[in-house]
Amino acid sequence: MPRSAAIAVSDSPPSLQGQDAYAYVELDPAAQCGSAMLAEECALAIAYNGIGHGVMMVSPSAVEDFVIGFSLSSAVVNGIEDIYDLRVTRNGDALNAEVQISNRAFWALKQQRRQLAGTSGCGLCGVAALEQALPQLRVLPPSPLPAAEHLHDLRTRIAGAQSLARHSGALHAALFVDQYGEIGLCREDIGRHNALDKLIGALRQQGRSARQGFVVITSRCSLELIHKAVRGEFATLVSLSAPTSLSVRWAREHRLNLIHLPHHSAPRVYSPAR
């Protein structure tokens, strides 16, 4: 019998949130209300033999599979036979994975003493504590929503503004639309977090107020981009891809206006809640 069959794995933790649909109101004269199911995400902290290794944002499904695969693909262990036990527990919006590995693998891990580098996929792989993954952020002052006409043909205008992507593709963009509805700045990067960081830096260097307009991201809207938008003091974040449920909750809690711009329907306002 292979050693993998002997791994003690806890029962999958219950869902972090019920699969409730999230309400939105369309940003157009009709102001139709609706609801949509949104993807879940959570912060997952992994510890080996009691020593914290890193925190990353993941979908809270097949978590045990992820931890085992991560341990193998990151060379924490050489084979599944080095994993003796795996326990996953829940604490609010966070999951904790306690992994017991062989002395051989743990000694090698301590020798490496490496901190995982962030990637364009999760953005939080180098975070060493859940307090950093789920930080305390100041609540923004309330701000009015942008005019609906400022979002008209926005996808087409964004495509025209992405000069680098036209030549190479594979680039995310973060754009600033001013109070007149004009795209004033566009920053591109292979990493969606990097693109937003570039935009925040450009606005600060130019002495422009992030609240006199709104930011648009071409990537999916996950929690770490909400963090950056709040810290960047934006009033409104517009995403071309649907936000995660955790992103909606944090945007509402911190008074960040959050709008999803679907391909073929009116913009959907998820925050503030209606």
Image (cartoon, rainbow, N blue to C red):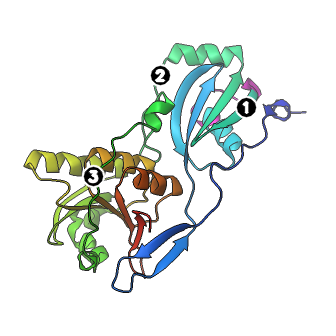
Secondary structure state at the residue bearing disc 1: strand
Q: Secondary structure at mark 3?
A: loop
Amino acid under label 3? Answer: Pro
Q: In the drawing, does residue 25 fall left or right of residue 18? A: left
Q: CA distance from mark 1 to mark 2?
A: 23 Å
Q: Are discs 1 and 3 less than 8 Å apart at CB?
A: no
Question: Are there few (<14), some (14-19), or many (20+) residues within 10 Å of tag 2?
Answer: few
Q: Residue at x 23, y 75 (%)?
A: 150
Residue under label 2:
114
- Image x and y of residue 171, in percent: 33, 58
**Labels 2 and 3 touching (C-beta < 8 A):** no
**Mark 1 or mark 3: which is in front?**
3
Q: Identify residue for label 3.
A: 141
Earlier along the polypeptide chain: callout 1 or callout 2? 1
State the residue lying farthest toward the bottom: 30
At label 3, counting other C-alpha atoms closer than 10 Å, the crowd grade (few under 14, some 14-19, many 20 or more) is few
Find the magenta span and give its range: 72-84
As shown in the figure, which amino acid type bears the numbered disc 1? Arg
**Labels 2, 3: front one:** 3
Looking at the image, is 140 positioned above or below residue 112?
below
Kind of residue sitting beneath label 2: Arg
Residue in view at x 42 percent, y 57 percent:
221
Image coordinates for residue 214, horizontal then vertical, percent: 24, 62
Point out the tag, 1 or 3, that comes first from the N-terminus: 1
Left or right: 96 as drawn, with respect to 33: right
Residue 247 position in % (x across, y down)? 46, 54
Q: Cα distance, mark 2 to mark 3? A: 40 Å
Q: Is residue 177 above or below residue 118?
A: below
Residue for badge 1: 87
Q: Under tag 2, what secondary structure? A: loop
* In the foreground, 137 or 3: 137
